Amino acid sequence: MSMPSRRTFLRSSAALAAGTAVLRNARALAAPTAAGPATPLTQFDYKDVQLLDGPMLVQFQQNHSLFMNLNEDSILKPFRQLSGLPAPGEDLGGWYTPSSLFDPPKNMTGYIPGHTFGQWISGLSRAYAVTGDKATQAKVHRLIAGFAPTISQKFYSDYCIPAYTFDKTNCGLIDAHQFAQDPQAFAVLGHATDAVLPFLPPKALDRTEMAARPHKNISWTWDESYTLPENFYLAYQRGAGARYRQLAQRFLEDDTYFGPLSKNVNMLPGQHAYSHVNGLCSAIQAYLTDGSQMHLLAAKNGFAFVLQQSYATGGWGPDETFQKPGTDGLADSLTKTHSSFETPCGAYGQFKVTRYLMRATGHSRYGDAMETILYNTILGARPIRPDGVSFYYADYNNHGAKKIDYEQKWPCCSGTFPQLTADYGISSYLRSAKGINVNLYVPSRISWQQGSARASLTQHTQYPANGDASMNLTLSHPERFTIALRIPAWAGRKTKVTVNGNAIDVVLTPGIWANLDRTWKDGDRIELSLDMPLRLAPIDDHHQQTVALLFGPVALFAIEPAASMITQKQLLAAQRIGSSAAWEVATNAGKVRMLPYAYIKDENYRLYHQT
């Protein structure tokens, strides 16, 4: 189908915008002018948390190094090319570089020129906030200075998904302002916003609505205007101006998504998986900024629907699509696709939405969901190569599942991966009015001001290889406060906590924070021992015989070739192989070796078993 003329497109967009002006203005007037509601938990600053030796630190350092060494002219080249400016530097290729070969869905070369620029800026800005590395800050400033002259409507004049790319640009610029102290980031954001607005729809459109409009090819139906509010709200919160709050409210997808979700109507089936989980972050920001209980309820219900159709790994969305509950969709995916879970993007979305929901509700169960996806998906992702070849999909197919990289360079997952790994620290701890909540049991150190005392807590742990984590406190002087430990819902009855080697009187209920309220002093030591039972997780309620084996939060994958039939009794009798990460299951056909996802290299594997 041919595209309408530029003049016709602008005229129709203006008419539609006028048609929604009354609703938009009413929303803006109804929204509270004060700051959003107080929340049970708040977020620490990036600088407060330091990752220590372990796989999370390795991933953060790999991504930081990769993007620090990426050529700046090459990064800026698509913007210079499409804006008609001199464009030195080598093409990065793949999705990132404009190409005449783009022919969706057959050939995705040149799909979204420059799309991950904002995410790379965001990842570097957050990395600077973590490390204080001045070279990282300087690179962020140079890239924004180089980007500023390229801003024009020419960039978007024949661009298939403008909202998708601008959302990432917005995120990068506000992060550069907030975390890398870039002095011109907000001015650049203002110009970038002016440039994209004529190309945005009057309201958030779902993909059905996008497909109903005249379009050049199918890629023009894939734009994601419904994800815009999250970063528009954040821009407003950080001081970019009132219009960003108004834009956020304009693009809330209330009619076809948040409104029904708030009434517990499941709108996920058939939807693009990652972008609709990402869209839930917009709903939570509407609550955090405007105090909208309807949007908080939509986010809570929406994420509950996600959990109902998640794999044992925490992943979701085979072929990037949510399945209809009560059908064979999820179970059938085990034989019909090798594109089971969009890993870096999906993990980034799940980390964000669970962190937001923990802040808004105080509930620890969202930390369980974050932990599941950490250990079973993203920590097993292959690193991005220097040429942009990236890991994209986790594969849960029953036949020939294997870790492979995506065929195109610089896909979407090359943008979310550095953002996610920079967020590992702030996801591990949260603040409460009474003290600190330990969400993830990872090698790390957090430092903060507690009352009149300067405090730090250092975690040493082999978790989840075993259930033991120790935490050492350093305090300038004794202070009374609460250290809340997340006790996962799967934790067994033998879970225990000691302070300085002594048992303490604290409630250890699975799925609830364990609150250690006392006067803490310098040198105090907490030891947590989580009981990590073996357990079976059916793929859904309708396929109780199709199960995965888990040890605590960790899914165990059978390394192929493996016995075609394994009973539930045999799975639950699995034995650890010495002190290694490997397990063995004795079957009638011999022993089957099992590994966590992060330990799988090039082996074929199987997640689910028909018992």
Image (tube, rainbow, N blue to C red):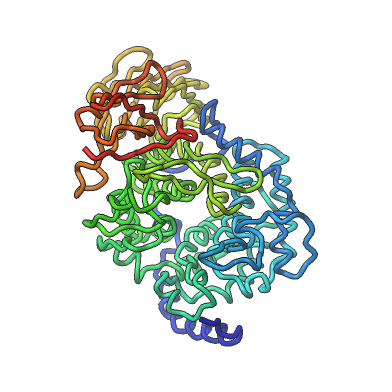
Q: Front-most of 287 and 86?
A: 86
Q: Front-most of 322 and 600?
A: 600
Q: Front-most of 305 and 410?
A: 410
Q: How many marks?
A: 0
Placement of the C terminus among the 4 image quadrants: top left
Q: Front-most of 327 and 461?
A: 327
Q: Is residue 333 left or right of residue 182?
A: left
Q: Position of residue 1 (x, y in %)?
A: 51, 81
Q: Quadrant of residue 505?
A: top left
Q: Residue at image x 63%, y 51%?
A: 121
Evaluate whether residue 554 shows in this view.
no
Q: Residue at image x 56%, y 32%?
A: 58
Q: Position of residue 402 (x, y in %)?
A: 45, 41
Q: Is residue 335 left or right of residue 540?
A: right
Q: Is residue 15 left or right of residue 537?
A: right
User: Farthest residue toward the top?
Assistant: 501
Q: Quadrant of residue 288?
A: bottom left
Q: Position of residue 363 (x, y in %)?
A: 32, 42
